[in-house]
Image: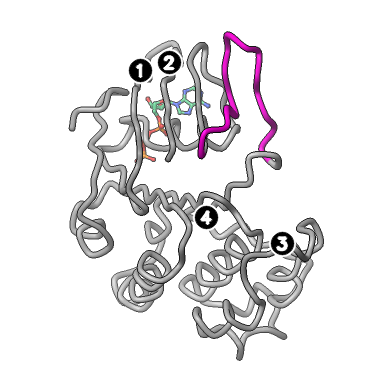
Amino acid sequence: MIEINATLKRPDFTLDVALQLDQRVTAIFGPSGSGKSTLLSIIAGISKPDQGRVMINGEAVFDDEKKINKPIHQRRIGLVFQDARLFPHLNVEHNLRYPLKFTPTNEQQFHFNDIINLLEIGALLKRTTHQLSGGEKQRVALGRALLSSPRLLMLDEPMASLDESLKSQILPFLKKVADEINIPMIYISHSKDEIMQITNNMVYINAGKIVA
Ligand SMILES: Nc1ncnc2c1ncn2[C@@H]1O[C@H](COP(=O)(O)OP(=O)(O)OP(=O)(O)O)[C@@H](O)[C@H]1O
């Protein structure tokens, strides 16, 4: 269960949300500038709210009253962004293995080979990141996020920079992760059509407020 009570004021924008996410997959959607990425960055610990509390599975990762503000790496959240953000100096295999170095073996939730098979990226392992299509990069980014053994997976417009044909190629993998991987997932998109293919559980945000 993820609970967020947060306000964050910027010169032309205020985010003010109170939200409890108790389904395994939640989509957050809303128009451009509505605050989706800001909400994600508050949960991840990238942005600090002016006030409020963020709880992940009963643990406060941010609480302004109790002066708690856990850094990103202690929140154990897997993030996938629109641009895959792979490490350009590492090949695909080393990108994927990178998070394993920071996760004790007894805390690793997935076997390397299971993730490779799930995302069908075995043939890409020896490639450099420059030798990947946009959709392949996203599959590798998804694999790397899962191999960090996160307790929450957050995807911020993971298909936004892909053309229609690549989108249709990656969608089945996103669905597989949503259906088969037992980790809470937050999926951000401004496309309702895209979201409907992944989950029926939607939160609508507009002008920094949860509308439905
Ligand atoms: N670092 C920042 N400094 C100041 N204002 C910002 C910053 N980041 C975002 N904003 C503003 O905050 C508001 C919410 O932005 P946010 O990126 O959360 O929206 P979004 O719903 O994710 O939009 P999009 O779908 O276009 O990515 C917007 O008005 C944006 O211009």
Determine whether the residue tagged by mark 3 lies in a helix, strand or loop.
loop
Magenta stretch bounds: 57-72
Image point (20%, 54%), residue name: 200
Badge 4 is on which residue?
80
The residue carrying mark 2 has its beta carbon less than 8 Å from ligand 1: no
* Mark-to-mark CA distance, 4 and 2: 24 Å
Q: Which of the two discs, 3 and 4, labels the residue nearer the N terminus? A: 4
Is tag 1's residue or tag 2's residue first in the polypeptide sequence? Answer: 2
Q: Closer to the camera: disc 3 or disc 4?
A: 4
Q: Earlier in the sequence, mark 4 or mark 2?
A: 2
Q: How far apart are marks 1 and 2 (CA)?
A: 4 Å
How crowded pointer 4 is (Cα within 10 Å; few <14, some 14-19, many 20+) is rated as many
**Numbered mark located on residue 87 in the image:** 3
Quarter for ligand 1? top left
For the residues bearing labels 1 and 2, Cβ distance under 8 angstroms: yes
* Circle 1 residue: 16
- The answer to if 43 sits in the magenta stretch is no
Residue 1 picture location, percent across and down: 42, 40
Query: Quick one: label 2, few (<14), some, or many (20+) residues within 10 Å?
Result: many
Say what amino acid the circle numbered 2 marks: Thr
- Identified at 43% across, 11% down, the residue is 11
10 Å crowding of disc 1: few (<14), some (14-19), many (20+): many
Task: Evaluate if marks 4 and 2 touch, with contact meaning CB atoms under 8 Å apart.
Answer: no
Residue type, numbered disc 1: Asp
Residue with the mark numbered 2: 7
**Alpha carbons under labels 3 and 4: distance apart:** 13 Å
Q: Identity of the amino acid at label 4?
A: Val
Report helix, strand or loop for mark 1.
Answer: strand
Badge 4 element: strand
Q: In this view, does 60 lie above or below 163?
A: above
Q: Alpha carbon of mark 1 to alpha carbon of mark 4: how far?
A: 24 Å
